Image (cartoon, rainbow, N blue to C red):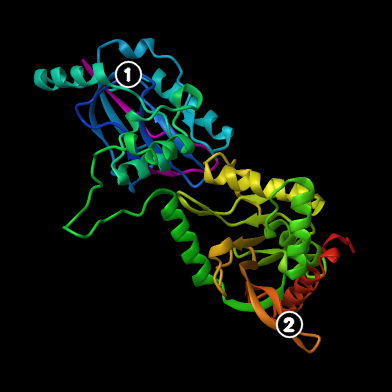
């Protein structure tokens, strides 16, 4: 018997470490080559790391939430002597949303690592442990799914081995998980873990940690100011209803508001911009890459409709739906989750009366959409029931003045209240 130390490989794109999201194995477990041993997360991607060898786990490095440097020992295996010579290259399973380019450095690093002789260790007598792990191995089933679904299952006490996966190689998708937990007969009887009686402690790790970090930085570093304006969407609702009935579709307000915003941004380039803090440069963009704030099981993500200025209403609606669904199901690519120049955020019917959205750095502005409600308004000297909506926007006061922000929102209001103007490309 000998020891095989598997070190965290270079994951590419300047990555210097990775966060442990979830260990799939523990000391004493027997694993087979290519079994998933750990989920890790970098700033670029979530990655499932498979076992490079078959053997017994001696030790692992780090707990969920800990960061392991590239080149540090990640896990130690006890393997049969001479087994390393027969190792084959193993492809890394990259989770939905990670760019395929991140797999190449990892495969190359693993291949190089396997060619190097591993340090020989003393033969460790563990008859009882091996008997136990042999039994585990016989019943072992690798469950393929994403870290977010594993986390939700862990918190809800759901046994993932009870779920039939419909994805490639039996991968459990978000739809599979939802179908399982909403079926009373299929729910697991395991209880969610709690700590200290009535208090449950959940460590902030993974995507939620990244979201928390970025929002904190944005709020701390950007001097926000808010501007709220009410908008009469009665005519827009009439047009929306008409188009939906004609084309048998389900257009929401969002594509109309997005198209109107795209039209007016050309007159306010200072609002369609990035601030590069490291270089001290404000970058005004001629093209509109529209961020769409989307609630997902992992928290708030901002998928991007690139070159939105080139799209019609129908194409824009289709792209908003597509990238939002990709973000919710962890299928969005790196490009689809980066590069936005301005963001629009909406809670739909939960939108409340007004809000103060946080700017999605390095952008300098964000437009928030609140819910539409019927209110009595004075129109042409008479009281009438109108459908009203508030637009709640936030801007970076370092680069967008109050006057410019108000002028942009007023121009947006003008187009929304006269919806034919939304389709006029000035």
Looking at the rendering, the stretch of residues picked out in magenta corresponds to: 1-20
Q: Residue at x 78, y 56 (%)?
A: 242
SS class, disc 1: loop
Within 10 Å of the Cα at label 1, are there few (<14), some (14-19), or many (20+) other Cα atoms?
some
Q: Which residue is drawn at 67% across and 78% down?
A: 229
Residue 32: image tag: 1
The residue that disc 2 covers is: 403
Quarter the C terminus occupies: bottom right
Q: Residue at x 44, y 31 (%)?
A: 172
SS class, disc 2: helix
For residue 289, which quarter of the picture?
Answer: bottom right
For residue 177, which quarter of the picture?
Answer: top left
Q: Which of 106 and 96 lies nearest the eye of the viewer?
A: 96
Q: Which residue is drawn at 70% across and 83% down?
A: 377
Q: Is residue 304 visible?
A: yes
Q: Which of 395 and 281 lies nearest the eye of the viewer?
A: 395
**Residue 398 screen position, x and y as percent:** 64, 76
For residue 3, which quarter of the picture?
Answer: top left
Find the distance from the CA under tag 1 to the CA under tag 2.
64 Å
**Residue 112 screen position, x and y as percent:** 45, 23
Q: How many marks?
A: 2
Q: Does the magenta stretch include residue 322?
A: no
Residue 90 horizontal side relative to residue 77, left or right: right
Quarter the N terminus occupies: top left
């Amino acid at each position: 018997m000998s020891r095989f130390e598997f070190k965290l490989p270079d994951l590419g794109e300047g990555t210097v470490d990775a966060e442990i999201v979830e260990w799939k194995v523990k000391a004493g477990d027997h694993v087979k080559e290519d079994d998933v041993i750990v989920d890790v997360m970098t700033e670029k991607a979530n990655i499932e790391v498979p076992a490079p060898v078959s053997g017994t786990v001696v030790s692992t490095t780090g707990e969920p939430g800990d960061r392991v440097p590239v080149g540090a020992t990640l896990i130690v295996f006890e393997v049969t002597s001479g087994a390393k010579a027969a190792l084959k290259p193993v492809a890394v399973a990259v989770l939905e949303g990670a760019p395929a380019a991140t797999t190449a450095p990892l495969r190359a690093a693993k291949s190089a690592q396997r060619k190097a002789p591993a340090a020989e260790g003393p033969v460790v007598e563990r008859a009882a442990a091996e008997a136990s792990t042999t039994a585990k191995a016989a019943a072992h089933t690798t469950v393929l799914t994403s870290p977010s679904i594993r986390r939700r299952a862990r918190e809800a006490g759901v046994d993932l081995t009870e779920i039939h996966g419909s994805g490639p190689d039996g991968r459990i998708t978000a739809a599979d998980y939802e179908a399982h937990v909403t079926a009373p007969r299929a729910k697991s009887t395991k209880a969610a873990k709690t700590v200290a009686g009535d208090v449950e402690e959940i460590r902030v790790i993974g995507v939620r940690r990244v979201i928390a970090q970025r929002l904190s930085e944005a709020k701390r570093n950007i001097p926000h100011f808010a501007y709220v304006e009410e908008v009469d969407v009665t005519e827009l609702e009439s047009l929306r209803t008409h188009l939906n009935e004609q084309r048998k579709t389900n257009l929401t307000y969002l594509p109309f508001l997005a198209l109107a915003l795209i039209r007016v941004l050309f007159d306010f380039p200072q609002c369609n911009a990035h601030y590069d803090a490291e270089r001290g440069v404000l970058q005004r963009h001629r093209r509109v890459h529209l961020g769409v704030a989307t609630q997902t099981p992992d928290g708030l993500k901002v998928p991007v409709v690139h070159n939105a200025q080139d799209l019609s209403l129908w194409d824009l609606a289709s792209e908003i739906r597509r990238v939002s669904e990709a973000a919710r199901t962890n299928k969005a690519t790196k490009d689809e989750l980066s590069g936005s120049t301005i963001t629009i955020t909406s809670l739909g019917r939960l939108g409340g009366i007004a809000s103060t959205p946080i700017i999605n750095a390095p952008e300098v502005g964000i437009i928030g959409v609140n819910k539409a409600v019927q209110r009595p308004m004075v129109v042409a000297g008479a009281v009438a029931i109108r459908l009203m909506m508030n637009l709640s926007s936030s801007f970076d006061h370092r680069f967008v003045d109050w006057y410019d922000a108000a002028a942009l929102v007023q121009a947006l209001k003008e187009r929304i209240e006269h919806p034919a103007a939304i389709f006029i490309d000035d």
